Image (cartoon, grey):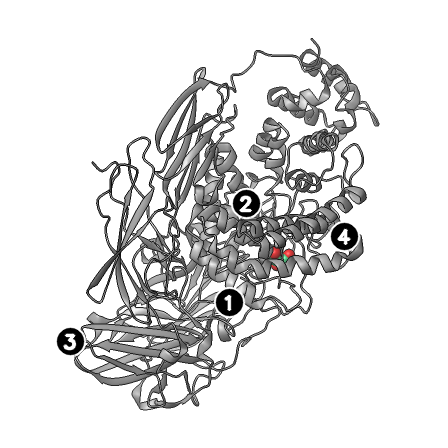
Amino acid sequence: MARCTAPSAPRFEHHDGSVLGIGAGAPRLSWTIDDAEPGFAQTAYEVEVTRAETTRVFPVEASDQVLVPWPAEPLVSREEAAVRVRVRDAVDWSPWGATSTVEAGLLSPADWAASFISPRTLAALETAAPVVRGRFDLPAAAVGRLRLTAHGVYEARLNGHRVGDEVLAPGWTSYSHRLRYQTHDITDLLREGSNELEVVLGNGWFRGRLGFLGERGLYGDRLALLAQLEVTDAHGELHVVGTDDSWTAAESGVLADDLYDGQRTDLRRPMWGSESAADVVDVVPVDLGVLVAPDGPPVRVTQVVPAVQVLRSPSGATILDFGQVLVGWVRLRVRGLAAGAEVLVRHAEVLEDGELGVRPLRTARATDTYLVAGGGEEILEPGLTFHGFRYAEVSGAGEVRGEDAEAVVIGSDLQRTGWFSCSDPMLARFHDNVVWGLRGNTVDVPTDCPQRDERLGWTGDLQVFSPTAAFLFNVGGFLTSWLADLSADQLPDGSVPYVIPDVLHDPAPTAAAWGDAAAVVPWVLHERTGDTGILARQLASMRAWVDRLDALAGESHLWAGGFQFGDWLDPSAPPDDPFAAKTAPDVVATAHLIRSADLVAQVASTLGEDAVAGHYRVVAAAARSAFGREYVTPGGRLLSDAPTAYAMALQWDLLPTPEQRVGAQRRLADLVRASGFHIDTGFVGTPLVTDALVGGGDVDVAYRLLLQTSCPSWLYPVTMGATTVWERWDSLLPDGSINPGEMTSFNHYALGAVADWLHRVVAGLAPTAPGYRRILVEPRPHAALTSARARHLTPYGETSVAWERDGDVLNVEVTVPVGAGATVRLPGLDEQTVGHGRHRWQVPDPCRVEEHRTPRTIRDVLDDPAIWTEVVNATAAVGVAADETAIAKRLTPFFDDPAAELVERLFAHGPRDGYGTLTKQLQPLLTP
Ligand code: BGC
């Protein structure tokens, strides 16, 4: 009797289902098992591979089910295989699972018969987007494949029908090293006899503007197309036609297109070009060795959002509000306009004084223009650009009704895998904002922001956000591709460009927390997806980065001096100086050297490379003792007396003695109190500070920081109506004006990195073995919440933790997928280990409100939210200090003093107006 359900249809590499045109001849396989009897454990599996009508079964004695090796001969180019799996435990076999198919792409440059072609005279910069056209006779197709790529971005149609549903293909990679091609199934679009393929080429990342220096054409000045049609006829014979010098080109109706500036379209012209103005094409030399198949999903339209209101601005402009900051473009229906009338759509993420707030876009024009055909109804929609926006100002279209406009959301079509919910609506909204931030910043490359003249693959932003990303979406293939670009663009000396793909070309890019993405991101992928292959692939790159840092540190083992971004955007840095953080860049730098050396050692030992592991352990140890000597006092104070410094030191084990650890923990909590529970960290410290607090037992302080709503805090943007995470803690100032800094995005994921802590610690769902094969369930309930829940589709299947406080009890429900196990730590219970299935516990609620206790010290006053709120309100009312932060600052030197002396301390230096009132009001709360 089968003791488990049939395994799922296998997945190949990090792809979600069946795959066409995979780049690996021996794709690794994964499956999930929906349900099994208690105690079931897979001990063996069989993979059945059917290719060219031959079926073979490969038995393997192993408990693995995630990214297991391809058991058969590798696939050859174009070869298809149908694969299914069954598994066995000690007792019996499961039924066979469903089948999925995998078809190899072109695995060798020699498989390409086509050549890159480029219009000879058309398609210069500043001219209309070209359409490249080919006609050919083909036999009736049993199977048809079209493989396509471009210098630029393309949209193709075959015999008048759009090919595929991809947007901005082939996406953005480090083109000179890696250029993706896509494989489409065109069997149903082909005709016996004459066929016509038309492809419009936009500038995209290849030739459009890129970066804040105003540059264009960074990869070349000629757009080009590579297309290969492959038809297998009824007799199994393969017919191949591809781009060559017999193709022609014409101008499309797209007069101008740019990712930053927008698209200008003349709807009076034939969109797919006029034959009468045909141009010849040149074959252009391109190394076909750079062609690679996609590792992850393409960019697609992922959602369509209706306009929620039509606003009239003070200046009289018509502004559409889509209710959500998103990424894509506007689809607009117009009617009855005169031929040639110009309709303009401008975009922005925020309004300022009721008008479109375009200053944050800097030089990106983000404007789509249409010259309409006139007369009847027309749909206006670009396709060779994208914008980051919530609002769109429309002019020239007459009266615009909400129902005539939609926002078309685009992005890499990543499978959603993670959810979080909780009883606090603001925190839940914050989490939604994190999800939207990720969606907007995964348009093929993990970017800093999607709207201004930047949109680059900033390494630091991803370094801090990658754990959150890996929980929320299946980013396995997406980041595998990005890491391949990172390795490709890494400098020979190991330096890692600030942005990947590198378009900044700094000659010596070494910045802590940014370049460390080389070490951190592969590790995160391994931890979250169970992929060990990625470690093997990236090890050389990781080592080169750490070797570079080790060389920079030299004999002192301290990485000091030189350019650093440091704890970028520390909230106390002035708007025009985001570098001005409280934590010294040198402290940030050596801390990162140690952390990355630790990671490389761990990776090497995972891969069984013990000598390599040993070497990096030595590098880390030397830097650790130098750090301890140089930056830590015997009592555990740090050279930079700032939360980021303590958070790094605590999280990365940089404090030599237990006493120093305790001292640092105490100091970190006091610094958070001293800021009145406001965030006081930039990009580096933000993902660490709540973990560091909880590690020191200061769960309450961590929650106070998390749930703060005044500026700066995670929830302040939510109070201001944010629908995404902002670049700055105060991108929008409390008075509703836009931060005056020249870098003010309203869609930046980095500061949303705390979401990983929401999943792991607030809800309590964390991986402790690669791919969540072992899960740590350790929720940290808090009085401020009545419930929280996290759910994640791990490579093994669905897991979740939900807790709810109900009366005197805490109810906890946990789901563990088949193949995984969990360690469960709940308040009042001994640690337990459980297997797959659903588990429930009821324990005493650890957050029961204790009966009122008079605070002993001033620190206790801050730690009691109710009393502290009264202190803040009363103190602000008499005008002693303006707000929570100022009051906390005043009291900081006196945290250890008796609570009864609080009022006295508030007036320590300065006029005593209000002393009497405050004493009367507060003293009863502060004295027993
Ligand atoms: C980007 C950041 C990036 C930074 C470098 C900015 O312009 O938007 O997110 O990491 O530069 O510090």
User: Which comes sooner in the sequence, label 1 or label 4?
Assistant: 1
Q: Secondary structure at mark 3?
A: loop
Q: Amino acid at mark 1?
A: Tyr
Query: How far apart are the two marked residues, 1 and 4, measured between alpha carbons?
Result: 43 Å
Residue picked out by circle 3: 234
**Horizontally, is 821 left or right of 722 in the view?**
left
Residue picked out by circle 1: 260
Residue 568 visible in rendering: no
User: Which comes sooner in the sequence, label 3 or label 4?
Assistant: 3
Q: How many marks?
A: 4
Residue 873: percent from the left, percent from the top? 65, 25
Neighbour tally class for label 2: few under 14, some 14-19, many 20 plus, Cα within 10 Å: many
User: Which comes sooner in the sequence, label 2 or label 1?
Assistant: 1
Residue 753: image tag: 2
Neighbour tally class for label 1: few under 14, some 14-19, many 20 plus, Cα within 10 Å: many
User: Which comes sooner in the sequence, label 2 or label 4?
Assistant: 4
Q: Amino acid at mark 4?
A: His
User: Which comes sooner in the sequence, label 2 or label 3?
Assistant: 3
Name the quadrant of the N terminus: top left
Q: Amino acid at mark 2?
A: Ala
Q: Amino acid at mark 3?
A: Ala
Query: How far apart are the two marked residues, 2 and 4, measured between alpha carbons?
Result: 30 Å
Query: How far apart are the two marked residues, 3 and 4, measured between alpha carbons?
Result: 68 Å
Query: How far apart are the two marked residues, 3 and 1, measured between alpha carbons?
Result: 47 Å
Q: Nearer the viewer, mark 2 or mark 3?
A: 3
